[in-house]
Amino acid sequence: MTIHNPASGFHRVTHDRPLIEQHIDAYRMKGKLPEPTVCPQCNAVFHKGRWQWMQAPADAYSETCPACHRQKDDYPAGYVSLSGDFFDAHSKEILRVVHNHEQHERKEHPLKRIMAIEQQADATVVTTTDIHLARGIGEAVHHAYQGELDLHYNPGENQLRVYWQR
């Protein structure tokens, strides 16, 4: 059941299929970075071909990571909309699931971060730096509390909108 009419350019995604990014993400690095490279904002280190949490050597190059770049530009990759009477009554518990999922993912994947959690007129919206984190948050909330989960992907903008309600 669709719980939200997506914006133009977004296509429905089913939960049982992996999300395959079809277009180039403007926030991905254009080429391979020299190793090691450290992000001056969050101190993540690009080492062995990926960003990771580790101590940066003194001679490390400096380059802003894609997650910090997205945060600076305020351009989320994922939007998770949480709504409904059940959410209103249990928002603290559900947001604890959201934060726990992000913390778990962020330990191994420094580019997966929550950017903001904002209360809007009819929903609470969680924005993320990564489409896979948005999907994972939606699936974690759905697994814990059931309800209705709807995913919409816009390949042109490499954005995912997740709608959960109960």
Image: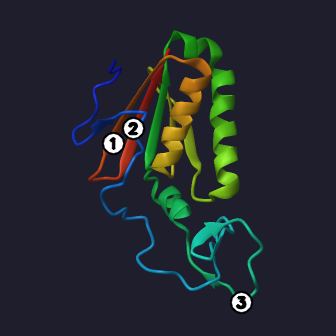
Q: Earlier in the sequence, mark 3 or mark 2?
A: 3
* Coordinates of residue 79 in the picture (x, y in percent): 45, 39
Q: Which residue is mark 2?
A: 161
**Residue denoted by label 3:** 59
Residue sitting at 56 percent across and 77 percent down?
Answer: 63
Disc 2 to disc 1, C-alpha distance: 6 Å
Front-most of residues 87 and 121: 87
Tag 3 or tag 1, which sits nearer the N-term? 3
Q: Seen in the image, is 63 located left or right of residue 162?
A: right
Return the x and y of residue 150 as percentages of the image width and height. Answer: 39, 28
Q: Which residue is mark 1?
A: 153
Q: What's the CA distance linking mark 1 and mark 3? A: 40 Å
**Picture quarter containing residue 44?**
bottom right
Please state which amino acid type lies under the numbered disc 1.
Tyr
Question: Toward the viewer: 73 or 51?
Answer: 51
Q: Position of residue 114 (x, y in %)?
A: 58, 46
Give the label on residue 96, or none: none
Q: Residue at x 51, y 60 (%)?
A: 72
Residue 12 figure quarter: top left
